[in-house]
Image (cartoon, rainbow, N blue to C red):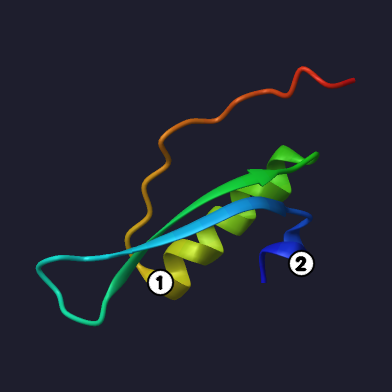
Amino acid sequence: MLADFGLNLSKIQSIPVMEKPWEYSFFIDAVFENREQYKSAMEQVKSDFGDLKIFGEYKSRKP
């Protein structure tokens, strides 16, 4: 799904939600070139999965 918006996942990690058996939180690092596509992807994630927290957005130093 995220690839449809031009996002490239460089890392994904899941951890169990302690208060909710069989539920997991996911942490990802993603690379993107188009900010509007990125925003659309995050809206789709919220729509499909509910809660979304973004801990940071950083511009790459690579040319």
Label 1, residues with CA under 10 Å away: few <14, some 14-19, many ≥20: few
Q: Position of residue 44 (x, y in %)?
A: 54, 65
Label located before the other in sequence (2 or 1): 2
Residue type at the position of mark 1: Phe
Q: In the picture, which quadrant includes the C terminus?
A: top right
Calculate the distance from the C-alpha at mark 2 to the C-alpha at mark 1. 17 Å
State the residue in front, 45 or 28: 28
Which residue is under mark 2? 4
Q: Secondary structure at mark 1?
A: helix
Q: Quadrant of the N terminus?
A: bottom right
Above or below 26: residue 55 = above
| Contact flag, marks 2 and 1 (Cβ < 8 Å) | no
x, y (%) of residue 24? 32, 70
**Residue drawn at (50%, 64%) of the image:** 45
Front residue of 45/24: it is: 24
- How far across and down, in percent of the image, does residue 31 sit? 71, 42
Q: Quadrant of residue 17?
A: bottom left
Judging from the image, what secondary structure is the residue with disc 2 in?
Answer: helix
Q: Residue at x 41, y 35 (%)?
A: 55
Hey, what amino acid is under mark 2? Asp
Q: Which residue is mark 1?
A: 49
Vertical side of 23 occupied by 39: above or below = above
